[in-house]
Amino acid sequence: MQSLKKIRVVVAIVVFVLAAAVFLDFTGHVPPVLTTVLGSLQLVPAFAKLFTGLTIASFGFLFVVLLTVAFGRVYCSTICPLGTLQDIVIRLSGRMRRRRWYRHKAAPAAIHYALLAASAILVVVGSMALVDLLEPFSNFGRILTNLGDPVLVSLNNATAFIFGRLGIFGLYQVPLLHTQIVVVFLTLVFLGVLVYLSYEHGRLFCNLLCPAGALLSIISRISVFKIAIVEERCTNCGFCEMVCKANCVDAESRTIDFNACVGCYNCIDACPTAALKFEGLGTKKEAVKPVAVDKPRRAFFGAVIATASTLIFSRNTDDKGQGPRVLSYDESRGTPVTPPGARDQKRFSNLCTACHLCISVCPPQVLSPSLFEYGFAGIMQPRMNYNVAYCNYDCVLCTQVCPSGALLPLDTAAKKEVQLGRASFVKDDCIVITKKKDCGACSEHCPTKAVKMVPFEGKLMLPELNNEICVGCGACEHACPTTPRKAIYVVANTVHQKAKKPPVQKLENPLESQKDFPF
Amino acid sequence: MDRRTFFVKSIGVSALAGSYLTFGKQRDLLASVAPPAPFDLVAVRGGEADVMFQKGIEALGGIGAFVKKGQKVVIKPNVGWDVLPERGGNTNPKLVTEIIKQCLNAGAKDVYVFDHTCDSWQRCYKNSGIEAAVKDAGGKMAPGHTENYYHEVSVPKGKVLKSTKEHELVLEADVFINVPILKHHGSARVTASLKNLMGNVWDRGFWHGNDLHQCIADFGTYRKPTLNVVDAYYVMKRNGPRGVSVEDVVTMKAQLLSTDMVAIDTAAVKLYGADPKDIRHIQIAAEQGVGRSDLENLNIKRITV
């Protein structure tokens, strides 16, 4: 039993390092399978993904639930990278060395469950706001994507600069196109709160604000094995309580509020008489302090059932939303273009926990965090930002890493038929009209030739749109040199449409006809 | 001219004057490297890209006429698009491999390859086959996807493009080999060596917004590549420069070599099947003295493999 803590620490570090690598890797070296497995184990995203059908994440979710049913909130101290981040802060706070022992405090369960219920109710009425703001994996992802990434990239760029001066190009400059200053600020605020809470109050975040913690806390009520204090071995020394960062051990009454226990096993490790151990159902049951089912919990269960059923039923009642229509450049800015695999802005926004994993893996960095573009309901969810880049036609990475099912997996062939939006061309703003000079940047970049150059006034060529085959990748908008408004821009399809395949005609091969030199 | 002197010069004196001095000298240096070529233009047909280069460069006196021992060589193929080689969007990797090998055999110290890509740079480098080709041959694939790699230079003979940001590798190169692929181009009509140099600079939006053809020609006046090799093995005949499918591409199995960008582009456009007079940037470049478009008066070597 004493070795449980060591195992916990090792597993936590491994998961933490891998999770950090998944978010921080800007080189594309982290294998996608790692991202998938790690994402599948994250409770809230995996729970959301259940509503998109049976996937590997369903097994991840099942695994976490079964693990909790067996041993309580093991998740919080191993699988949850935000939990480990707090543990690092707790460790750095030097709390133990400075003898600032923890004291038992009844977990603020009523507030915690009420927050979970509120989050769930908001989801039912179509807002992910609370989940986005509180969900641990997403917060961890946002901390790494919006704070960790800029720091790491700056270090990389400084090193790459020095190496570059020496003629070594193994390291290269990395741009930070997806960094949005307000989102960086919001993430900093959250990190500040998290660091303060963990520095001063241990794992209070997990027992006060965290929706995953609340869910697991409920499940842990029926855990088969729970940590208990063996009365006859206990000497009332109180070490277990002093080291409990979840404040759930009451040494005096020799009881443990197992619902609040985050499974760190510090108590087991600290006990000089090995009086703490996992006990199975039925044995020494009286040693575990029974916790009364209070009203907030009842309210919560009701809310969960309501949420689940509403979500299930709402799947079939997706309204068609706004179809493609022509908007002016400024109007079009009001509706964000959703990433490939989102299918429908409403569906997407109801599932996305804003973990920013898609943003961190996007090679051209066209995916950027929004602020309120999806409304407050979809705060910080990703959108396509064609100001800084455009979607690479053959790339499907974002659709494959999404842990919550907000982006459904697409293969390259399928993605090429998804129309995220439709290009809109304002002839009067085009360089060819205003300056009477050739440009064609839009058509050059267009992967389907939905924008094609046609003869216009003598030898000039003017863009012409065929929206049927436009995929809404934003290449034209990104490349268009007109300022301040782009002459060609993508108007979002709030419900993704099917793009027709570009027409393909055979060309005759002039190798036979033209063997000679025409000069 | 090493990196340090370059930086000290361009920072120390006023940036424009400094870079003008630097490049004035560099051009002289290059001129002294390349001896008078026996032919103004070499055209090869009918072989694989590497074989055609071997024949072509031989006719120009061998790679040794362009690359000397210990020199730093920079090769600029077209790697603009995330497409496979058979799509004809990027320079043939076989050709790039062959050029690098020959440069290294001639004693080049380092051979660098880069492009300022349009699609995501790492995907372009990988899927074009160029990155693997460069590594195979012993060259170094260098990045060009952020502004840090580019430094302001003045284009003294430019009419519209007076200054631009050029990739630092090209600034430091003893030998610069321009290796475009010949293809259709929605904006420039046909792209070959003059247009390929647009991948050497950072701000292409300015070119597009301020008379593309004039800017292409202007940049042609900035620096003459040591050698141009136009890859016309796969030639995209429509939907360029990116292309939509392999159906846009014909297998032409041709290659052109010249030190004169106007001459080689004029020949390339004919090979492509268009009239060079319709390609405005080539006409302007000829008028601005970048090179000669009068193919009939040039000494052309034609080789069929």
Image (spheres, rainbow, N blue to C red):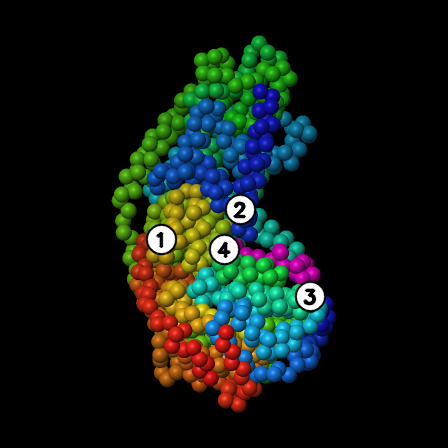
Q: Which residues are magenta?
A: A162-180
Label 4: chain? A
Three-letter amino acid code of the residue under disc 2? Val
Helix, strand or loop at disc 4? loop
Q: Marks 1/4: CA distance?
A: 19 Å
Q: Which residue is mark 2?
A: A30
Is residue A245 at all visible to an observer of this figure?
no
Q: Position of residue A186 (x, y in %)?
A: 51, 48
**Within 10 Å of the Cα at label 4, are there few (<14), some (14-19), or many (20+) other Cα atoms?**
many
Label 1: chain? A
Q: Marks 4/2: CA distance?
A: 13 Å
Three-letter amino acid code of the residue under disc 3? Lys
Three-letter amino acid code of the residue under disc 4? Pro
Helix, strand or loop at disc 3? loop
Disc number for residue A414: 1
Q: Which residue is mark 3?
A: B109
User: Predominant secondary structure in magenta?
Assistant: loop
| Above-or-below relation of B66 to A75 | below
Q: Which residue is mark 4?
A: A363
